[in-house]
Amino acid sequence: QVQLVESGGGLVQAGGSLRLSCAVSGRTLYAMGWFRQAPGKEREFVAAISRSGGYIRYADSVKGRFTISRDNAENTGSLQMNSLKPEDTAVYYCAAGPGTAPQDLGANGWGQGTQVTVSS
């Protein structure tokens, strides 16, 4: 298991933006993804990016608003979140795995989570 550390969460008004980052320990590259869990709800998939960065997938709820990216030289990942809505409020987790399918992410590690709160 690798160590993943998220940063960048916070409180923002609806329509605002936040950028989350995820630092991965070691030099091995994995597919990376983001999930979120709102109070009383199950964890849900948000976005994923392949090891090369050449394949990206998003949940329908965030398409056109969120952008996932990675820096393989630094072994970090990012999630740029624009046009935030109150329903985006959740704890956001980054995950590493062998592939971008949601069921594959997390196989190699999860971050501790970072809170994102969007006020109306």
Image (cartoon, helix red, strand yellow):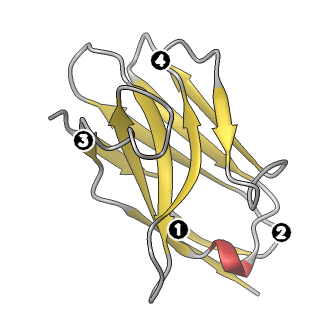
Mark 3–mark 4 Cα distance, whole angstroms, equals 15 Å
Q: Which residue is mark 4?
A: 51
Closer to viewer: mark 1 or mark 3: 3
Residue placed furthest toward the left: 1
Q: Which mark is residue 15?
A: 2
Mark 1–mark 3 Cα distance, whole angstroms, equals 23 Å
- Circle 2/circle 1 CB separation < 8 Å: no
- Circle 2/circle 3 CB separation < 8 Å: no
Mark 2–mark 3 Cα distance, whole angstroms, equals 31 Å
Q: Which residue is mark 1?
A: 10
Closer to viewer: mark 4 or mark 1: 4
Left/right of residue 85 with respect to residue 113 in the rendered view: right
Q: Which residue is mark 3?
A: 109
- Circle 1/circle 3 CB separation < 8 Å: no
Camera-nearest residue between 13 and 63: 63
Residue 7 x/y as whole percent:
41, 51
Residue at 73% from the left image edge and 58% from the top image edge: 17
Left/right of residue 77 with respect to residue 64 in the rendered view: left
User: Under tag 4, what secondary structure?
Assistant: loop
Residue at 50% from the left image edge and 48% from the top image edge: 34
- How crowded pointer 4 is (Cα within 10 Å; few <14, some 14-19, many 20+) is rated as many
- How crowded pointer 3 is (Cα within 10 Å; few <14, some 14-19, many 20+) is rated as some
Quadrant placement of the N terminus: top left
